[in-house]
Image (cartoon, rainbow, N blue to C red):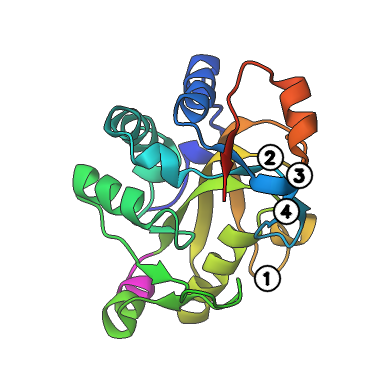
Amino acid sequence: MSFNKCWQYEVPTKTSQMVWRSLGEGEVFVTREGGKPFILASGQPATLKADAERLFAKRKLRQRLLGIYSVHPCVVEADALSFAPNGMAGFAEALRKKLKKPIIRLFRPEGAPRTDIRYVDEEEDIRLTQEVGSVCVLEDVSTSGFSAHEAARVLFSANPDLEIHTLSMLQRDEVKEDYQTGPGAIVYHTFVRQDLPLDVAGFKDRFPEIPVLVVP
């Protein structure tokens, strides 16, 4: 199977608004005590982070998002699912069960560099990667596209002929051109395209209605 409808698909405004509202209801936007910065997967320091794992802990919101993801053409048309580790592992597994679709499992060891992504089961996951023609890499929040691109790099190492698209809940900045052209390129899709400030003060100024939690 290849991506046909996915190329030109535009997320309905109502769906995009529902995902954005879910992110707020899920209290995914966090800042650290004392203003200590996070280091995003892109390498950028930021005092505002979107922690989608908090959303998945809320059953109603998780079920809502599973329903939204399950009808997107990039998910429907893919031969197999994968994900940008580690935050999407649980959600990807739930989506696999809902759709009865194969999944290629990846992980990043605790404390390892962002580029250290591995197969969970080298024999089984590599075999599946080599058998399929298209993969949808699931992602929660993307900044520059780095995490999905690194996951795709691992998949391409086992099967360079793959067609890989990625689908995030939120794209908070521009995807780097290098990730979308040339060898190892993938196609990026998102439910919400929203430029977000890296600093929490800027976020609160632009989106005063959305709560920001303070975490250690």
Q: What residue type is labelled 2?
A: Arg
Residue where numbered disc 3 is placed: 174
Instruction: Point out the tag, 2 or 4, that comes first from the N-terminus.
Output: 4
Q: Would you place residue 191 above or below residue 166 in this image?
A: above
For marks 3 and 4, the one nearer the N-term is 4
In 3D space, how far apart are the residues under numbered discs 1 and 3 (Cα atoms)?
Answer: 20 Å
Depth check, mark 3 against mark 4: the one in front is 4
Kindly report which numbered mark, 2 or 1, lies closer to the viewer in this rendering.
2
Residue type pointed to by label 1: Pro
Element marked by disc 1: loop
Q: Does the magenta stretch include residue 131?
A: yes
Secondary-structure class at tag 3? loop
Q: Give the range drawn in magenta.
A: 128-132
**Which SS type dominates the magenta stretch?**
helix
Query: Camera-side residue: 9 or 51?
Result: 51
Furthest toward the front, the residue is 34
The mark nearer the N terminus, 2 or 1, is 2
| Residue 131 location, quadrant | bottom left
For label 2, the crowd category at 10 Å Cα-Cα, with few meaning under 14, some 14 to 19 and many 20 or more, is many
Residue named by callout 1: 183
In the picture of the structure, the residue carrying the numbered disc 4 is 37
Q: Report crowding for label 4: few under 14, some 14 to 19, many 20 or more residues within 10 A (C-alpha).
A: some
Label 3 packing within 10 angstroms: few (<14), some (14-19), many (20+): few
Foreground: disc 1 or disc 3: 3
Determine the residue positioned at 45% across, 78% down. Answer: 118
Spot occupied by residue 169 in the image (x, y as percentages of width and height): 52, 38
Residue sitting at 50 percent across and 39 percent down? 6
